[in-house]
């Protein structure tokens, strides 16, 4: 059964006077319900709370939240509720991102619809990173004055079209959450992290992990028709890309970074270093006026190998 | 303004006793109206009739029809009307093809929906040529016994992301149909063809051309946000690809061929010969059980050059 693994992502920073960590649980339940998602579980430390959702994740810091939802969720509908709960005037930065979807006919709205909704409430700019006929990522950000913390770097690794063997392994309904963690070698990456994960039935896997101010979230859509894995974190993923690619054997992947621009706005793009087989690579980047450089690398690994068409089931 | 140039295509062959050339005009009007298209004009010779539509084209031979529609048309809805008008029992082969769309949230149905509709009426098979995250083409064909004419070869050349200059030239609202023909050098390709073309307002262009049993149809969506040009014909396009690519400067293109399999079903794929710059190329092919080899080449030409994101208008 097909599933749209590609995420929509909402990141909102608030002015200092708010403390989101003291917000009642029911408020977060109400917010994620607007996206048609529910809270499954939670882990927390002194710096942040991490909620595992029925579709992806919510991270909450004192003055910031990061809400990621996949599938057919309506993330855009949470914006109004968040503005109502915390006051639109308290929002210092809003970034709304959508990865390109492959079953977009099943989505409740398009990014173009969402931009209309957002621009009715906020002054902002929107961009498409990548051509329409390649991997591409849409972003809207507010244009009010904002200076990010110098260490607020995030990166996303998105894997498309896992190898048949990997897909077969990860769709085994007997696989436990622990076995998936072992399969991904997460112990090597997430040393001393608090881990909260969930194995969906019959397959699918999500994990949130936190350690001090670091977060890491992984979401797996293993089925062959629409296989996809996303990694998003504020630890540096560079050192792990090679091992993950060689283990999960995607036909292609994207690597997206957000880097604070600092004092001068002319930061050169720091292209990710990639070893291993690459057939085609494209980088699109921009210094956004909201204070981050966004860079998107799209890499095709072994796409040429599969030159037979895929059978479409009559019951899809 | 965005427009989904990518076509849906329906090809139906009928048993010998029918003569579609003697069918009343109102019948074709009724059929294309089911796709929400209208007939704009017609040209004909002893072998075929070619109708230019508000969205693409209809070609009619004695025992065969080819209906191509683009935009947000509902081509699938014509199948029932065609079966009603001519008798489902008279259909010897039905091929339904959809190119991958880039604004699929605007489509009335998905290919997956269409396959359900078709498989309720016909025994058939369906395939996706190409990965979901690359250019890909869906096809459904009936599986009743069918042997194509040995000379029934067709090919399609689909150009995506025309260069800025080409897009600017072709969106000039003062451009006439004649000037577009000259720009495309159609006189060189369509020697002695009857030509029927139409310049849409403010831009966009369609042409049908016929000569004996040969047809040629071109549809241009020139606007930069969604630029696309399609060429479909049963003359050999190979000799013209290089000139067209060098003139229209797409960032990528597909070349699709349908070749009769003949007596033995093990025809080797004849990959198209391509000169000029190629960054990435993928070929997917299959010998279909309905008697044709379908081959899809996807070629990225100068995709790496444009490494800045595209601005999304708030009013899109």
Image: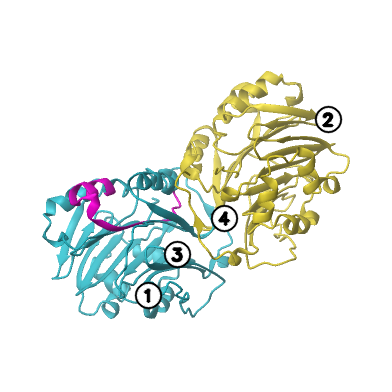
Chain colours: A cyan, B yellow
Q: Nearer the viewer, residue A145 or B42?
A: A145
User: Residue A178, how many percent across, how many down?
Assistant: 23, 70
User: Residue A133, how many percent across, how many down?
Assistant: 55, 55
Label 2 Cα neighbours within 10 Å, binned few <14 / some 14-19 / many ≥20: few
Above or below, A286 relative to B241: below
Q: Identify the subunit bearing mark 1.
A: A
* Marking on residue A40: none
Cα separation, mark 1 vs mark 3, equals: 47 Å
- Does the image show residue B157? no
Kindly check if marks 2 and 3 are in contact, taking CB atoms under 8 A apart as contact: no
* Res B212 → quadrant: top right
What kind of element bears circle 1? loop
Q: Is residue A146 magenta?
A: no
The residue carrying mark 1 is A263
How many numbered dots are placed on residues in this image?
4
Left or right of residue A299: residue A227: left
What kind of element bears circle 2? loop
Same chain for labels 4 and 1? Say yes or no: no
The residue carrying mark 4 is B135
What kind of element bears circle 4? loop
The residue carrying mark 2 is B45
What is the magenta range?
A: A79-103
Q: Identify the subunit bearing mark 3.
A: A
Q: Residue at x 25, y 53 (%)?
A: A54
* Marking on residue A164: 3
User: Residue A145, how many percent across, how many down?
Assistant: 33, 61
Above or below, A94 relative to B172: below
Label 1 Cα neighbours within 10 Å, binned few <14 / some 14-19 / many ≥20: few
Q: Identify the mark nearer the N-term, 1 or 3.
A: 3
In front: label 2 or label 1: 1
């Amino acid at each position: 059964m097909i599933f749209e693994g590609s995420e929509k992502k909402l990141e909102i920073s608030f002015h200092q006077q708010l403390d989101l960590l003291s917000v009642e649980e029911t408020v977060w339940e109400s917010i994620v319900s607007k996206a048609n998602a529910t809270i499954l579980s939670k882990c927390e430390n002194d710096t942040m709370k991490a909620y595992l959702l029925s579709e992806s994740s919510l991270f909450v810091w004192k003055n910031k939240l990061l809400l990621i939802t996949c599938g057919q969720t309506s993330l855009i509908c949470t914006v109004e509720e968040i503005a109502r709960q915390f006051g639109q005037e308290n929002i210092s930065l809003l970034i709304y991102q959508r990865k390109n979807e492959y079953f977009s006919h099943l989505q409740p709205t398009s990014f173009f619809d969402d931009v209309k909704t957002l621009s009715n409430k906020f002054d902002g700019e929107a961009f498409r990173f990548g051509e329409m006929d390649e991997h591409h990522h849409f972003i809207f950000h507010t244009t009010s004055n904002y200076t990010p913390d110098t260490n607020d770097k995030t990166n996303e690794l998105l894997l498309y079209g896992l190898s048949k063997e990997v897909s077969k392994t990860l769709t085994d309904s007997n696989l436990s959450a622990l076995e998936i963690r072992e399969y991904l070698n997460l112990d090597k990456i997430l040393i001393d992290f608090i881990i909260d994960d969930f194995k969906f039935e019959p397959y699918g896997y999500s994990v949130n992990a936190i350690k001090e101010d670091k977060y890491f979230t992984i979401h797996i859509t293993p089925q062959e028709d629409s296989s996809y894995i996303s990694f998003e974190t504020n630890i540096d993923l560079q050192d792990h890309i090679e091992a993950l690619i060689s283990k999960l054997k995607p036909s292609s992947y994207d690597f997206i970074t957000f880097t604070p621009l600092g004092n001068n706005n002319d930061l050169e793009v720091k292209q990710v270093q990639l070893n291993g087989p690459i057939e085609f690579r494209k980088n699109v980047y921009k210094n956004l006026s909201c204070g981050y450089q966004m860079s998107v690398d799209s890499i095709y690994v072994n796409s040429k190998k599969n030159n037979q068409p895929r059978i479409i089931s009559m019951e899809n």
